[in-house]
Structure formats: structure tokens, C-alpha cells
Image (cartoon, rainbow, N blue to C red):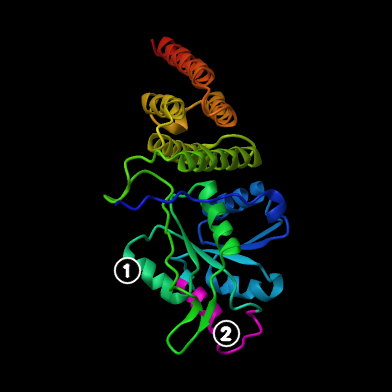
């Protein structure tokens, strides 16, 4: 039997996150800003940043964060070196590393089995694969806080216990031949809708935190819509799939998501939220909402075509 693909959990609330201190380490200013905005929009109480591993180490003793997000490739000291230096403080005490067991989440575009294994051997707890969505970041916080791994100190390895098999969930379109085409179990359908709801809410909070849609949030919204369509198709939620298709098709017609109007994006996020909040069996109500979206898209396209003419 094909193993069902697990959907990410991102159920932490703002109250759960309000006391959390997070350090974000990345040499790309835009990436740091995006992660910081996502975390603050979600309710994380304290978020600080560093632009490479050495300055991150210097910040550890001063700030004593509860969790670290770090990039892999950075100048001076990269994410692997940073992780190894923190973990080794469990063997050779280092006053600049107050907690050698601190959860470390690597945000990276490296996704091969060997690269994952290298990072695991360095002592990384979990991964977020680029390009990411708001819920992907929050789900990893949920994982390291709700399901902490025992810390191992041995001759050959120092870090979180790797013997428990971890689901390196990629929250996006199918990428493996082993991924199922669909899931129809009632429980999984509910879980999928809940996951979509969490991801959409995280996206809305990010847009609000950044003062509206911009190129970065539009690109991220496009990824969220792809994920939503994939999950809706998995669980045969036709109305969610149609609502998502309406935006993705419009983006394709106008030359990319970055050319979509803010009101179009907002309307889709609102309708998707209304469908998810409504009765799962209210097909008539959901269809009415989707038809309204599709009518809006037709008007927008007609308006663009009239201007072009």
C-alpha cells in the first residue's frame, strides 16, 4: 500500500508563540526580512537577526534565543559550521553558547538525500525548503516544540536523536512518484482543510504585517495557491480547487502573479476562507462564492483587454 503523504501541522497560536525568542541567521537581507515578518505576524514575541554564523554565535550569549533559523550557505561561518560549533559546546563547555541543545532549523534550497544527511550529521533538528510559505516555517516550530528529539552526546555524534524517522514534508505540489494522487478519508479531508486554513491565515497575517501586497508576498501567495490546489485535489474538494484555479489562471493570463491586483488577491483569500469556515457539505453555498470570484476575474480580464485595445 502506498504510504500517505503527511500534511504539515501549524496549529500554534499567537499565545503559544508570544514568549518565544527566535534568532534568524541569513546573509540575504530580503530573506531575513521575510522570515522575521512571518514570525512576527504569527505572534512570536522576540525576533532578532544575524547575517552570518560568527555574529550569530556572538548573539547567543547576549540574547539567549529559544530557537534558531539558519541558512546553509553564508560567508565567514556557514550554517553547518554554526550548528557544529553550538553542538560541540555540549562536549566542551563554551560560555558563549548558553544552550548547546537549542533547536536549529535550517532554511535551505539543498534538498538531496545526501545534503539532508550532512546537515543531520551536523546536528540540525529540522528543515524548511526554499521557496517556503508562512505555514512551512510555523509548522517546523510546532514540530521542534511539540515533538522534541532527545539530545545525544556520543563519540561519533552530538545533536538531536536521528533514530526517530522524520517526515521531511515538502508543502507543495507532487514531487515524488510515491506521492498519492488523492486522499479521500474523512479525517484526512478535515486535516487537509484545516492545514489550508492555517496556511491562508498565515499568508493574510504576513500581507497585513508588510502593509499590503508587494512582489515578495505575491510570489509567496502564488506558492500558497499551488499548495492549496494540490491539497484540494487530493481530498476531492472541488470548490476549493476551482477557487484556487481562478486566481492561478488569471495570474497566468496577465503575465505572472506579480501583475495581479491587490483586490483580486484579497478577494480570493477571503472566499477561500469563507469556504473553509462554512459547512463542508454546503456545496451550493461554496459554488455561489466561487461563481462570484470567477465573475470578478472575467470583469478584470475584460477591463484589461479594453485598456490594451
Residue, x 43% and y 51% (percent of image)?
Answer: 6
Residue, x 53% and y 29% (percent of image)?
Answer: 280
Measured Cα–Cα span from mark 1 to mark 2: 25 Å
Magenta region, residue range: 80-97
Residue 23, position as x, y percentages in the image: 62, 64
49 drawn magenta: no
- Based on the displayed image, in which of its 4 quarters is residue 17 positioned? bottom right
Residue 297 in sight here: yes
For this orientation, the residue located farthest to the left is 177
Residue 210 in the image: above or below residue 136: above
Q: Which residue is mark 2?
A: 90
Residue 308 in the image: above or below residue 110: above
95 drawn magenta: yes
Give the quadrant of the C terminus. top left
- Based on the displayed image, in which of its 4 quarters is residue 155 positioned? bottom left
Residue 50 in sight here: no
- Give the mark nearer the N terminus: 1 vs 2: 2
Classed neighbour count for the residue bearing mark 1: other residues with Cα under 10 Å, few (<14), some (14–19), many (≥20):
few
Amino acid at each position: 500500500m502506498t504510504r500517505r503523504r503527511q500534511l504539515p501541522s501549524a496549529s500554534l497560536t499567537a499565545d503559544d508563540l508570544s514568549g518565544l525568542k527566535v534568532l534568524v541567521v541569513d546573509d540575504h537581507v530580503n530573506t531575513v526580512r521575510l522570515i522575521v515578518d512571518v514570525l512576527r505576524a504569527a505572534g512570536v514575541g522576540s525576533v532578532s537577526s544575524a547575517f552570518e554564523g560568527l555574529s550569530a554565535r556572538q548573539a547567543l550569549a547576549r540574547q539567549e534565543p529559544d530557537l534558531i533559523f539558519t541558512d546553509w550557505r553564508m560567508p565567514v561561518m556557514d550554517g553547518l559550521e554554526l550548528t557544529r560549533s553550538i553542538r560541540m559546546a555540549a562536549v566542551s563547555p563554551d560560555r558563549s553558547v548558553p544552550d548547546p541543545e537549542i533547536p536549529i532549523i535550517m532554511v535551505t534550497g539543498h534538498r538531496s538525500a545526501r545534503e539532508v544527511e550532512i546537515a543531520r550529521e551536523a546536528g540540525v533538528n529540522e528543515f524548511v525548503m526554499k521557496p517556503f510559505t508562512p505555514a512551512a516555517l510555523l509548522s517546523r516550530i510546532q514540530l521542534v516544540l511539540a515533538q522534541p528529539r532527545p539530545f545525544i552526546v556520543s563519540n561519533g555524534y552530538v545533536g538531536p536523536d536521528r533514530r526517530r524517522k522524520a517526515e521531511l514534508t515538502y508543502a507543495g505540489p507532487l514531487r515524488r512518484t510515491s506521492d498519492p494522487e488523492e486522499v479521500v478519508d474523512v479525517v484526512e479531508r478535515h486535516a487537509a482543510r484545516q492545514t489550508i486554513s492555517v496556511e491562508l491565515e498565515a499568508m493574510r497575517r504576513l500581507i497585513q504585517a508588510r502593509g499590503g501586497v508587494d512582489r515578495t508576498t505575491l510570489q509567496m501567495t502564488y506558492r500558497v495557491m499551488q499548495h492549496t490546489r494540490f491539497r484540494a485535489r487530493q481530498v476531492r474538494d472541488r470548490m476549493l480547487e476551482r477557487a484556487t484555479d481562478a486566481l492561478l489562471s488569471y495570474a497566468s493570463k496577465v503575465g505572472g502573479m506579480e501583475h495581479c491586483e491587490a483586490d483580486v488577491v484579497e478577494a480570493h483569500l477571503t472566499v477561500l476562507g469563507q469556504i473553509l469556515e462554512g459547512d463542508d457539505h454546503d456545496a451550493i453555498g461554496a459554488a455561489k462564492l466561487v461563481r462570484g470570484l470567477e465573475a470578478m476575474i472575467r470583469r478584470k480580464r475584460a477591463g484589461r483587454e479594453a485598456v490594451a485595445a
